[in-house]
Amino acid sequence: MTTPIATLYDATLPDLEALLAEWGQPRYRARQIYRQLYVNLVDDPQHMTDLPRALRDRLSSDTALTSIALVQVQQGDQGMTRKALFRLPNDAVVETVLMVYADRATVCVSTQAGCAMGCVFCATGTLGLLRNLSTGDIVAQTMWAARELRGINPDLHLTNLVFMGMGEPFANYNRWWAAVERLHDPQGFDFGARRMTVSTVGLVPGIRRLADEDLPINLAISLHAPNDTLRSELMPVNNRYPLADLLDATREYISKTRRRVSFEYVLLQGRNDTPELAHELGRLLRDEHAEPLLYHVNLIPWNPVPGTPLDRSSRNRVLAFQRALQEHGVPCTVRVERGVEIAAACGQLAGQARQSQPSSINVEFV
Ligand code: SAH
Ligand code: SF4
């Protein structure tokens, strides 16, 4: 009987060792394969040239690297932004975005096909949840980006990994976290935990769980409104986890980890971008707490999603919002945009093959 590993990217090193033991192979072969996958970034067992041919053949015939298939890569920003479209076995699609800058390279990875959270401003939210990605699917997207980057320039390496693509990471916590551990594994890809950031819509149990994990990855929380009425209109999840609960969990997270949290705030003209709301947010984050939170606000210009009745805030309104927050002493920056022309920007990921998406399934919030 063979150890059931779904795909090679789903396997830990001990999983591979168990598989190789069943195949009657020496243990060190597993380590060679693991290094080929995560250090040499090999995407075909036939290219694992330190293995005997028979073993390469067996890997090719009896295992697969991943269950997601690369369909297309689009380029924008003179090739410095690249969006990959992957097809899943159930025909749903997910997207991954690689952004190359002068001094860093960031990959934005999806954790679910579609998303059940239904935020009104988000393209992914319009799809509903189509499928949770497996650990291997999440790892495979990152490996695609690492290889793509090497193709641009062999001296470049991924410096940042953000779980801000399609889906809500904390609604797929176990598989997502196993991917974090795999990518961090010093025997493999060895990606520093402090260079990873997860963004959540505000699932409180996920925030509490993350606070107890032993890898210090960064946390970003999608806030988008300073009061429950407006937040519930924009993000249905607020009915389940209202602001007071969210901020309590955030405070606990900060006091446990001593790590700074970022609050994301997408600016929608006339909906959540008025000076009054900026002051309300300033008071919420600053004045009403005896001990200021260790946090930072990231203002995100909204990327238009066709079919929504929303508008993007003008530059002036973005800057006025920032100034108002700064009056309260709230640390705050405006996010630089990338990939807009290939629909690779935040919240635009929905896949071109939308019509052929299978129908969505309903899930409960965790
Ligand atoms: N589900 C997680 C992570 C994926 S979305 C979350 O919601 O946090 C990553 C970020 O993009 C979130 O802050 C989300 O609110 C924001 N976003 C969604 N749609 C957007 C859009 N059209 N323009 C700009 N940002 C958007
Ligand atoms: Fe899901 Fe995040 Fe989009 Fe909301 S913003 S629908 S949580 S992907």
Image (tube, rainbow, N blue to C red):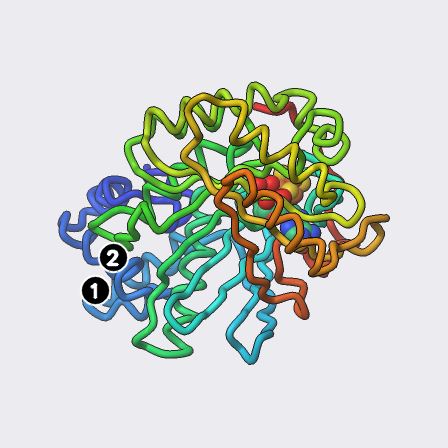
Q: Are marks 1 and 2 in contact (CB under 8 Å)?
A: yes
136, 25: nearer the viewer: 136
Q: Position of residue 60 (x, y in %)?
A: 37, 60
**Residue 200 or residue 18, whichever sits in front:** 200
Displayed quadrant of residue 359: top right
- Residue at the image point whose x is 49% and y is 23% from the top: 289
Quadrant in the picture for the C terminus: top right
Give residue 199's position: percent from left, percent from top. Answer: 51, 41
Q: Quadrant of residue 240?
A: top right
Question: What residue is disc 1 on?
Answer: 51
Q: CA distance from mark 1 to mark 2?
A: 8 Å
Seen at 70% across and 59% down, the residue is 316
Q: Which mark is residue 33?
A: 2
Secondary structure beneath dot 2 equals helix
**Residue 118, relative to residue 69: is it above or below?**
above
The residue nearer to you, when weighing 322 against 304, is: 322
